[in-house]
Image: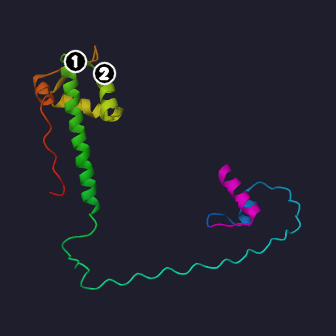
Amino acid sequence: MGIRTRLKNRVRKMLGRTGPGAPSPTASASASAPTSPAPSKPPVAVAAPTARPSPAPAPAPAPAPEAAAPAKSAEAPEVEPKQSIEAEAEAKAARHFERTRRAVLKFIDEKGGVAKLSDMHDYSERKYFIGHRRFSDLMETLLEDALIDYDHGSGEASLTEAGRTLGNTKMPPRKRSGS
């Protein structure tokens, strides 16, 4: 049991409260180290709370007429299935990844066709929030697609003609989910 839990339990015990997460006093006493019995305190007289008039209950809303309610069809579900939400999120992530690939290729082109790996990493991290693991994936796809050539000795990537073409090509318009 952590110190935070023990402190919370002691405070609850001192205040005489037992909540849904508070263990019974016998369980906490047996779980903790044996302690000397606390001196008993004389009972304190507590003034009874004054009764407040309860507020009037809110009026119940009028029932809607049956004709005004739209008919629910079995064809159109009200809530989107979880798969379509996940598929949309994956499509957005793939589009962001492709946009980042093209931006990195354009960045290399603006540097004269050759860029240091550290410069490319900093650029993708600052501008596109691509972390270390995702940057490794990005570099692997650029190499697999023969868009760059990487020299391990100098740590530089040089742009190929295919990479230059893709880097200067605009992204296709995204597909709208509602249209």
Amino acid of disc 1: Lys
| Mark 2 and mark 1 residues within 8 Å of each other at the beta carbon | yes
Amino acid of disc 2: Asp
Is residue 115 found inside the magenta-colored segment of the image? no
Q: Main secondary structure of the magenta part?
A: helix
Residue extent of the magenta highlight: 1-19
Sequence-wise, which precedes: disc 2 or disc 1? 1
Hey, which quadrant is residue 5 in on the image? bottom right
- Position of residue 149 relative to residue 86, above or below, is above
- The disc at residue 119 is 2
Residue 141 visible somewhere in the drawing: no
Q: Position of residue 27 (x, y in %)?
A: 71, 64
- Apparent side of residue 178 relative to residue 54 in the rendered image (left or right): left
- The disc at residue 111 is 1
- Apparent side of residue 156 relative to residue 2 in the rendered image (left or right): left
Residue 157 visible somewhere in the drawing: yes
Quadrant containing the C terminus in the rendered view: bottom left
Circle 2 SS class: helix
